[in-house]
Image (spheres, coloured by chain):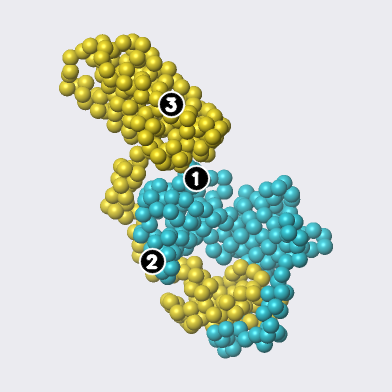
Chain colours: A cyan, B yellow
Amino acid sequence: MTSRRQLLKSAVLGGGAGVVAATALGSLGPEAAFGAAAPDVEPGAPDPDFAEGRIRSIKDNTLLVLGSNMVFHNIRVVDGTSLWKLGPTSFDQARPGDGLYARGVRMPDGVLAAESVWLNIVNIKGHVSNITSEKIHLDHKGQEVLCHRVAGKSIAVYSDAPPSADLSLLRVGQHVQILGAWRPDTNEVDIATVFSPH
Amino acid sequence: MYGIAALQPYVIGLFLLWAALMKLLDRRMRAQAGQTALGRLVGSARAVPALRLVGVLELAVAVALLLPPALPVEGAAAAVLSTGFLVYLTYAHLAAPASSCGCLGAHSRPVNWRGFARAGLLLVMSLVAVQARLYPVDPWLVVLGLAEAVALLGLSAELDRHWLMPLRRLLVRLRKPLAVPSSQEIPLEVTMRLLYLSPAYCSASARLTSDVQDVWDEDGLRFVVYAAGGRTAVFAVPLPGDDPSAIRVALTDEPALI
């Protein structure tokens, strides 16, 4: 890992630039950059390169996931797969019961080779009904969601100000949007980002 | 005991009077009647007439309770009304769990235990009121009456923004439960928000095929690594920094993972 990091570091410090020159990508046309990624999926049809659901079991590097539409997915996690669980994390943090969204490439045998996996990620809006020690009580359509601040991870974005680790400007009664990681089978969430309109 | 019974018609009467006047006069409440559980029960077109009918019933019972003489039938009428509230709340909880009850004011919170407790308290008070006789005023009864009124108002979620929210705001200001952490460490999300704004990220984002694969801090820089198709995109973000244009990016052929 260290030597890979050194390689990448020297690449960005030696040859890195403020922007990626189009020629470095092989084409100057925007249609090449965006057209290549255009999904070849019928509107309304499920995207074969995407999966969502909850982990039923983990075997070696494969996740068996039951989708909310009761379809099973086999998701293979490889060295290059990015995993998110309140931030970039490693494969050993995945647990049965975790909810996930995964994107990757569907193999001929039906396995989804994942490029990215987001574990327990949630995006909820609501009103701050109370603030207690290290917790925001969120009223989300009448349901209480307990949102925990995680030291060193949780941040707040107030309107268009630069983001900060300071959550103390949040007020009881205000509207917020919270991006975070759900604690499976509870009404609790660890906060990644709180968006406040002011 | 007779004193307590004699007190109840006034507390119930004033409470019902308030509820009736809200239903009959509050324009916002009428406007939202279709979205309450009452609208679900009778159909949203008939929600406003139904709301008015309940308001008139409450007003009639309230006036009867407040005006002498105190008759047992008045307490019984209030008990019937309270039972009706409980049945209605049960219906709302089961059939329209996301709707508000539309009891005392316009708000969007669904029926919860406080609504049941309030209706239950009203029912108990109404049953006691059946025993009401003429009774001399006693300071202890005034205290009890005030306590009952506070309990009824405290159980009314419609009033929370007038007392509960300011109280919680005050407590938050005093206790500072989310005080700024002392740690100087910059959360990754702060870096990520800056990164998303940078010309470097914008020029490379169409090529990124994964979320963050690896992050580390070194020499005052935070390195963030993504997969970009068969290659690797690496960003160098100055720490601490607030200038997105200072972020550098390189696309490299994937070095072997070791």
Say which element carries label 1: loop
Is disc 2 in the same subunit as disc 3?
Answer: yes
Whether residue B159 appears in this view of the structure is yes
| Amino acid on which the number 3 mark rests in the picture | Val
- Subunit under mark 3: B
Q: Residue A196: percent from the left, percent from the top? A: 43, 60
Task: Select label 3 or label 1 by which is in front.
Answer: 3
Q: Give the chain letter at badge 2.
A: B
Label 1 chain ID: A
| Residue furthest bottom as drawn | A14
Say which label, 2 or 3, has the lower sequence index.
3
Label 3 residue SS: helix
The residue identified by callout 3 is: B54
Work out how far the residue at label 3 is from the one at label 1, CA to CA, in angstroms. 26 Å
Residue at image coords 38%, 48%: A130
Residue A134: x, y in percent? Answer: 40, 53
Q: Quadrant of residue B258?
A: bottom right
Mark 2 Cα shell of 10 Å, populated few (<14), some (14-19), many (≥20): few
Per the image, the residue denoted by label 2 is B183
Which of labels 2 and 3 is toward the front?
3
The amino acid marked with disc number 1 is: Lys
* Label 3 neighbour load within 10 Å: few <14, some 14-19, many 20+: some
The correct choice, above or below, for B243 with respect to B173 in the image is below
